[in-house]
Amino acid sequence: MREAQADALSADDRVFIMGQELGEYGGVFRATEGLAERFGAHRVRDMPIAEQSMLGAGVGAAIMGMRPIVEVMFMDFIACGMDAIVNHAAKVGYMSGDQMRAPMVIRTQGGSGTHHGSQHSQTLESWFLHVPGLAVVVPFTPSDVKGLFKTSIRVDHPVLFVEHRALYRTRGAVSDPVEPIPLGKGVIRRRGDDVTVVGIGKSVGQAQIAARLLEEEGVSVEVIDLRTLVPLDVDLVLESLAHTHHLVVAHEAVERGGWAGELVSRVVAEGFDELDAPPLRAGSRPVPVPFAKELEAEMIADERLIAQRVRQALGMVEYAP
Amino acid sequence: MREAQADALSADDRVFIMGQELGEYGGVFRATEGLAERFGAHRVRDMPIAEQSMLGAGVGAAIMGMRPIVEVMFMDFIACGMDAIVNHAAKVGYMSGDQMRAPMVIRTQGGSGTHHGSQHSQTLESWFLHVPGLAVVVPFTPSDVKGLFKTSIRVDHPVLFVEHRALYRTRGAVSDPVEPIPLGKGVIRRRGDDVTVVGIGKSVGQAQIAARLLEEEGVSVEVIDLRTLVPLDVDLVLESLAHTHHLVVAHEAVERGGWAGELVSRVVAEGFDELDAPPLRAGSRPVPVPFAKELEAEMIADERLIAQRVRQALGMVEYAP
Amino acid sequence: MFRLMYTIRRFEVTMERAHLEGELYGPFHSSMGQEAVSAGVCSALRLDDVVASTHRGHGHAIAKGAVLGRICAELWGRSTGYCQGKGGSMHIVSMDHGFVGQSPIIGGSGLLATGAALAFDLNREERVAVAFMGDGAVGQGVFHESLNLAAIWRLPVVFVVENNGYAHSFRAEQMQVNPDIASRAAGFGIPGVVVDGIDVFAVREATRTAAARAREGGGPSLIEAKCYRWRGHNLGDAEHLYRAREEVEEARRNDPLERFRAATFDLIPPGVLEEIEAAAEEEIDEAVRFARQSPPPDPLTALEGSF
Amino acid sequence: MFRLMYTIRRFEVTMERAHLEGELYGPFHSSMGQEAVSAGVCSALRLDDVVASTHRGHGHAIAKGAVLGRICAELWGRSTGYCQGKGGSMHIVSMDHGFVGQSPIIGGSGLLATGAALAFDLNREERVAVAFMGDGAVGQGVFHESLNLAAIWRLPVVFVVENNGYAHSFRAEQMQVNPDIASRAAGFGIPGVVVDGIDVFAVREATRTAAARAREGGGPSLIEAKCYRWRGHNLGDAEHLYRAREEVEEARRNDPLERFRAATFDLIPPGVLEEIEAAAEEEIDEAVRFARQSPPPDPLTALEGSF
Ligand SMILES: Cc1ncc(C[n+]2csc(CCOP(=O)(O)OP(=O)(O)O)c2C)c(N)n1
Ligand SMILES: Cc1ncc(C[n+]2csc(CCOP(=O)(O)OP(=O)(O)O)c2C)c(N)n1
Ligand SMILES: [Mg+2]
Ligand SMILES: [Mg+2]
């Protein structure tokens, strides 16, 4: 992430970064370490705690031709800046009849696993499928982070770029120079014959673990990483289903109202005849994320739930929500 | 609505109302007219324009035992108070291990049709399916408004109560005294044999119009009014499908990421074998709501779209998203 | 400046009529009575300075130079409107004139202007961003966030609060203990001044000072322009519920246009203002004709321009 | 008061150790160095007054009277914790003691306290609500919204800003032009005072004044307590990136506990404080034992209690 941002700052004068703890501190997850020194405190700007105006000022700068990267430290705090994103960033271009655009990357990270409690552990990207005007990117591998970021900072629209806390330490080969990855193109991470499991970000890794578990049970799982939710690569999923005829959609977000519902609905509408069994979703239970590890494990969707949903989709065990 | 609020204020000392233009003005949609005079300005409180603190103070009062009714004038402004709703109202009860509760009714109204433009016409209730901790109520008939409100103000959890601007002038018989209507129970508004159309609020009326249009084409439509989105009456829909075997879910909200995706996914998972054809959604196109009437008509889901989706669901015409 | 003020006045009168006659639709917020603020502020700016506005923004757009015909066409929802019919009365934008948009989300204009000023600062441009806001915006948290950000970064912003006495039915005294909005400035370490918003010269002077300060790197200022909203909050507002007709009549005696006439009585030869008026009226008539003759937008354009 | 301060100090030391030894998990924000604010404020309150707190809330909870064993059990994620393991360190609640919760959403405590005060006002109860906040909260819009609401409605709220010099790595001077946070109060027409947050008597006195004023219908006050955060922002914080070790050492010489000792040297017989210390330590040990021996929550309880 750090390199992706450094590249963007070097490549384009219009790029700058705003957020909390970015400067001397280098970001709470170290994604901006050293950048303030290298590019100056005016281009890597530390912010008071004021999400709405940070994002709103991002919009104001973007319509004047800049390309802000605005970092919201925890995705939960997006609720504090929702108006700037939903009513301003996503709409000013359209409402103006395209006289202006608001190209900006809103970086954030979310998810469970660090026991921060209900107000610091949410996975909220699904809201933004429902907000026309924003692209939504949720990378999984380090090289995708770079490739998708490169595209995101160049796109003429606002992009919500969601990282997962648990993935900051993931290592992986990154080509140099990295190629920009188009938005709206998923990839198959693992080939399989019996069922397609679709995820984004951390869920892709969990799907891969689930696939290994299921292999021992004789089930062959194909894993798709969508990489972006808006645009949504339904075609890739339909292609895979033409082969596997079974679908499980996995996300850590609460299942109720989550983006899996969108994908399932699209797949059903456009590929009903390919389906040999109902597509199932593997999302978290509808409660806030609790603190204690025993409680969290009960409600968060993980590789065990994904594996179970696969068994249910294949009729190996009976479905229970 | 006015009567529902008056009843609540009379019946329970703990109830009070906060919002903009409520006192002397009686609410921009007249839903609080006369209430300030009758119950005093301390119980019907005019607010400065400050959605976050209005909602946040509602939470603070609720945890001390009050039952606030907080009115957000346009649903779009909920984005300005999202943190208070999502991170506080919906979570404080759970996080405290049930030591406290935040019973409050958040009233708002949204939707298109008055040409207020992109920032004053959104339909955003779908977001809140994805926020565990809140009930979501979207009444259609005047007597449901009263009956559901009566329940909402008594429930020990926060309730988002969404009205539609176009329905403020609807008239209809209201029994006296009105019976509280349980949350999570839909009703069949019209019996039919060929297809089930499910909606809430204004969409139910549109579904009824579409049903009449389709009758002339020889199609018999069953119309379900869900009344609440959380809890969601999936059972009623499944029962209806056991008879009609075809489903269309209608809402004015943008289709992408809207609640129809949740219902379709649930129905598919729990009633796949009842379906003779893919369930379809009739929602608005993924753009902000534009001002000009020709443009709005193009993107907003209405009775014509519902009718078209029904034809598609029944295979009378080919499906195109 | 007289031309601007007169144009705004006539524009509001004309649009109001078109609305009442059913030719226009959607909400309509008249800026009648507040012409001196629009004209005074914008005449103190350069062309490449920018202005962000509110739901009550016709006067601001006109004063910043936006073309009347295209504003009208937008109000009419026509394809030739500034936003091709996607915006309407509350969303006029003219990037060519540095009118970077209205935000009818109360407080939003402050964010847009602060961000624009941040862009100027990053690019080391000597440009100024102005945020028009109503007195109602002072209740919003983001108002304070904007002041604070602009203050700590010394951004070239001028926050202009048009205190027209009401936020819809709510009187300024009900919304804050300290009735002088300008007093909020001190807590943020920036200058805050009160000006008579009926006096276009006073407004221009205050704006000049604030803009010059901003341009020289002196940071933001807050100007509170006290004025009065002649019309209801919007067309169809039930004004009588919260203010007496006499109060409005009394306030209307303090007319910014008359004030200008009185102040310039000795300076402007007879007939000159009348000529200006006639020209402005002609321009408005022409704009209305343009709007009426323009075609409605192609419905399919509704689906373009968004992710 | 000494007992409270000493308990808080030892509690933080003990929990920090348990964390480092891997017995506790999740984020941990120590309030070490700020004991005089917690103790000074809460000892000026009545039992039925309420306190809303922040991410750095152990001291506030203890000072308001919450039971140590149940706090500990919550930190340990046990079923006997105040929130049955659903809350954790940033979400302690004890309704029995008027400790109505922490909001680690910066600025959130102000909203909760304002709302609680609104309830008192509606019910004509003579109770006071206190919001503890960090200096970081002053950047947030809702901070100002809360002040304004409480001011116009004359609600019984005391806003206590613990200015400990830092919002994580960010120094107060970087976040606002005017370094005295108390100066924000004037714009809202309410009293704002600065107190020495190391001096528990000064804090108590200021709180008494503000609480009495609130109880008598005089409305809200803002108290800025200047203090210093001894520990990193959280456990594991890379403090060296933004402050020098010497700065911390210097600040630690100004210890609220030592200040108390010095101030009371002539008044308290020798040995008394030592006895109090021993009792406090015993209480903490007992609390830890209770937490350790408590069972973890039944996983299925995770799914209860929410719509
Ligand atoms: C965030 C938000 N809340 C509420 C409203 C509804 N509303 C529209 S205009 C208005 C009053 C605004 O008053 P003021 O800022 O003084 O501007 P004026 O109308 O007097 O020009 C209100 C409450 C809104 N547009 N945005
Ligand atoms: C809305 C929001 N934005 C950002 C954060 C991340 N954050 C947690 S603590 C903190 C610093 C808070 O500083 P201050 O208010 O001074 O309290 P202190 O930590 O000094 O006690 C920040 C930025 C947050 N918790 N909430
Ligand atoms: Mg006003
Ligand atoms: Mg601090």
Image (cartoon, coloured by chain):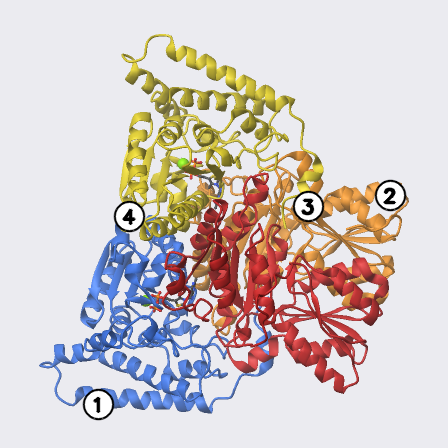
Chain colours: A orange, B red, C blue, D yellow
Q: Are marks 1 and 4 in contact (CB under 8 Å)?
A: no
Q: Nearer the viewer, residue A74 or B261?
A: B261
Amino acid type shown at disc 4: Gly
Please tell me if label 2 and label 1 are on a single chain.
no
Q: Nearer the viewer, residue A248 or B113?
A: B113
Query: In the figure, is residue D156 to the left or right of A17?
Result: left
Q: CA distance from mark 2 to mark 3?
A: 20 Å
Q: CA distance from mark 1 to mark 3?
A: 71 Å
N-terminal-most mark, 1 or 4? 4
Q: CA distance from mark 3 to mark 4?
A: 45 Å
Which chain letter matches label 3? A
CB at mark 2 closer than 8 A to ligand 2?
Answer: no
N-terminal-most mark, 2 or 3? 3
Q: What residue would you read off at disc 1?
A: C275
Residue C117's place in the image compared with C259, above or below, is: above
Residue A7 visible from this viewpoint: no
Q: What residue would you read off at disc 4?
A: C187
Label 3 Cα crowd, 10 Å radius (few <14 / some 14-19 / many 20+): many
Label 3 sits on a secondary structure element that is: helix
Q: What residue would you read off at disc 3?
A: A202
Q: Are marks 3 and 4 in contact (CB under 8 Å)?
A: no
Q: How many marks?
A: 4
